[in-house]
Amino acid sequence: MKPTNNTILITGGGSGIGRGLAEAFHALGNKVIIAGRREHALNEVTEANSGMASVTLDIDDPDAIRSFADEVTELHPTLNVLINNAGIMRAENLKAQRVADAEAIITTNLLGPVRLTAALLPHLQKQPSSAIINVSSGLAFVPFPLTPTYSATKAALHSYTLSLRVQLQGTPVEVIEIIPPAVATDLTPGRSANAPRMMSVKDYIAETMQLLKTQPTPSEINVEKVKFLRFAEATGSFDKALQMLSQLRLPNE
């Protein structure tokens, strides 16, 4: 992926990792469009970054995604990079047998990226140099038992990304996966910029952008702090990592 001269769409761009990526790519001179449900959050980012654009999107609504794809490609015909970043994380008690949270997480974290990718892929394949970047998680490789569906959706997104990459070989579309560790964002209520055991957004974005600017761009973007989870099975550390995560509690608990 070329680091400059792109038109980049980032879902969940109003806060956290999405905002960090948006501002970093914007600073490199790329044209950046952020999308999300919270218009006030989007406006806050664009007001702080002159020239950045925003479009509201309900990633849970299939009809809204199709309309959004038509709108964003009409407004920004040079769009050539999609970053599927929007996601939600919720703690779940599986013994309670309540599935509403699980259904919401699957809709946002998995169906959202799949639907938006499908809607924009015809356009992206017409661009001379384009990319789809899916943001998964270290929890795709070792699940956090308190957030089982979140972990499962990220594992599914990782698998989907692998297949997407194979199917798009020979096209202009590059497929990249960003795999964050625990980053101190508002993904989970109670997190803060100083949350223990978590990487700051500033440090995470700086290390991630260095990797994204590498030529050729790696197919996976793994900062040092996520490698323990990403390669836990390969290094024989899976059981140790799962036990470690089993002992953790969410910040608001």
Image (spheres, grey):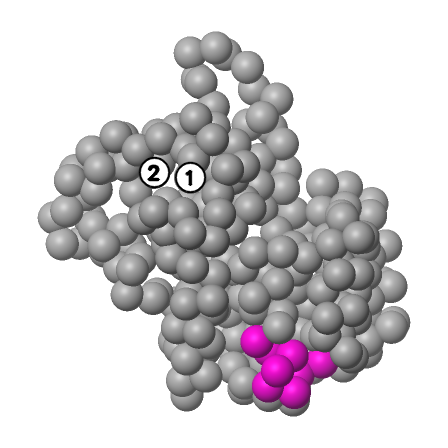
- On the rendered image, what quadrant is the C terminus found in? top left
Count the marks: how many?
A: 2
**Amino acid at the residue labelled 1:** Ser
Q: From the viewer's perspective, is residue 43 above or below residue 155?
A: below
Which residue is rendered at x = 65% and y = 64% of the image?
10
Regarding mark 2 in the picture, which secondary structure is present there? loop
100 or 129: nearer the eye? 100
Query: Is residue 133 covered in magenta?
Result: no
Which residue is rendered at x = 40% and y = 47% of the image?
195
Which residue is rendered at x = 52% and y = 75% of the image?
174
Q: How far apart in space, not on screen, are marks 1 and 2 (Cα)?
A: 5 Å
Regarding mark 1 in the picture, which secondary structure is present there? helix
In the picture of the structure, the residue carrying the numbered disc 1 is: 151
Circle 2 Cα neighbour tier, 10 Å, few/some/many (<14 / 14–19 / ≥20): many
- Residue 251's image quarter? top left
Q: Position of residue 123 (x, y in %)?
A: 74, 72
Q: Which residues are magenta?
A: 24-31
Q: Position of residue 96 (x, y in %)?
A: 48, 10
**Amino acid at the residue labelled 2:** Pro
Q: Answer whether labels 1 and 2 touch (C-beta < 8 Å).
A: yes
In the picture of the structure, the residue carrying the numbered disc 2 is: 143
Q: From the viewer's perspective, is residue 186 above or below residue 7?
A: above
User: Of label 1 and label 2, which has the lower sequence position?
Assistant: 2
Which residue is rendered at x = 54% and y = 44% of the image?
187
Q: From the viewer's perspective, is residue 219 above or below residue 31?
A: above
Residue 161 placement, left or right of 236: right
14 or 217: nearer the eye? 14
Outermost residue, left direction? 236
